[in-house]
Structures are given as C-alpha cells and as structure tokens.
Amino acid sequence: MNEILQTTTDYLHSLSLRERILVLIVACGVIFFIGDSLLLTRHDNAINEMKNEQHNLVSERQDIENQIALVSAELLRAKSIHQEAIDAVSNTENELKQKTAQIEDKLNRLVPPTQVTALLRNLLANTDGLKVLSVNNEPVKDVSIDVDPDAIDSEEKTKTLLYEHAATIKLSGSYQQLYDYITELENTGWELFWDTLHYRVTTYPNAEITLRVLTVSTDKHWIGL
C-alpha cells in the first residue's frame, strides 16, 4: 500500500503544473461522479421504499374498506332481519288484540254463571204449567288450549284460560210447553249453549225433557242454580 502511495506521489511530482491541475480536475470529477452515483442510488432506494410503503398502505386501505363494506352489509342484513322480526311481532300483537277482542265480545254475550239461575227461572215463568223435576250441577271443567306443543312438561304444553259450567235440567210438561221453553231459551238476549236433549213421552200429551245447558267464563266457580 505504501509502495502504491509512494509511486503515485513520485508520479505527481514528475508532472508539470498544468498536468497536475488536469489530474486534480479528473480526480475531482471521478470523486463527484462516484459520490453522485452513491447519492442517486440511496435516493432511488428511498423512493423505492416509499413506493413499497405506499403500495402497502393502499393495500391495507383496500382491505379496511372491504372489511367496512362487509360489516356494513352484515349490519344492513341484521337490521333487515331485526325489522322483519319487529314487523312480525307487531302483526302478531295486532292479531292477538283482534282475537282477544272477539273472545271478549263472545264472552260478554254469554250468560254469566251467577245469572244462569235467574235466567232459567224467568224462562220457566214465561211457560205456564211447565215443571222442573230436577237440576244437577256438574263439576267445573277447565277449557285448555295448546301453548307449546313441543314442551316436555304437560303444564307448559297447555294453559287454562276458560272454565265450562254445565248443568242437566229435567222438565215435565206438554210438547207445546217444552217447545216454547226451548224457543225462549234460544231467543233470549244472552247466549247459553245446550248440547244434549232427551225427549220422552210419559202420559200423552205430557212428556219429560232432559236438557244439558252450559256456559263459559273466566271465573272458576259453580253455577248458582
């Protein structure tokens, strides 16, 4: 290394001033070119790094935008399902209100259990000569409806909302008297169900009629006959 430096120094001393200046200019140009090349290379590397970083940022932004779009679509779908559920509940509530109003209207037109006695007595008073032979009250029956058919517990499957109050009435009189009584029973302002009727002639024109009447209410108690 020292020999190279010594040789170079001797060579420079052997040159004239003009030649030394030229060599210095060339050396400066070479040094400038090398430095400029190094600077350009670093600059290009920095630009490439910035481009790569920008590309990564763009990719990340696209991924985030895609995720936002997916989440927005899922939210819209969930909102739509939620709205459908709300509408279904609202429709069910409206239907329930209508059914409840219909049931209440029907119940309001039925004979209350506490007034069955007065009703039957008034009907007898309107039919001269008709006699009551017997009146037998029946136990109150539950009127249950299916609430959850898939439930394991029987109490959860059905629910008692109404109670049936029934009685069997045995009357004696002529055919016309019995007919008038049934007509009065059907034409009364109240609704009273009757499901069985047995007619038997005893001594003509007299006969006996056995009639099962019933009403329905939300109260669990006996018919006052």
Image: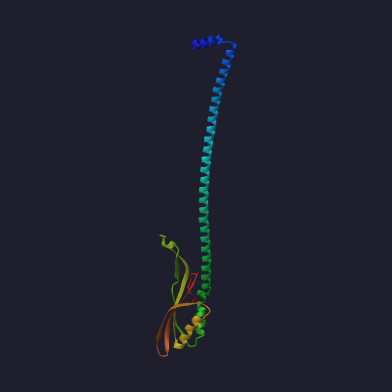
Q: Residue at x 58, y 15 (%)?
A: 22
Q: Nearer the viewer, residue 125 or 184?
A: 184
Q: How is the image coloured?
A: rainbow
Q: Residue at x 57, y 21 (%)?
A: 32
Figure label count: 0
Measured as percent of width and height from the top left, residue 181 is found at 48, 84
- 59 lies above or below 204: above
Q: Nearer the viewer, residue 208 or 155?
A: 155
Measured as percent of width and height from the top left, residue 193 is found at 47, 77
Q: Is residue 173 left or right of residue 18?
A: left
- 208 lies above or below 152: below
Q: Nearer the viewer, residue 161 or 40?
A: 40
- 31 lies above or below 113: above
The quadrant where residue 156 appears = bottom left
Q: Residue at x 42, y 85 (%)?
A: 208
Measured as percent of width and height from the top left, residue 123 is found at 50, 83
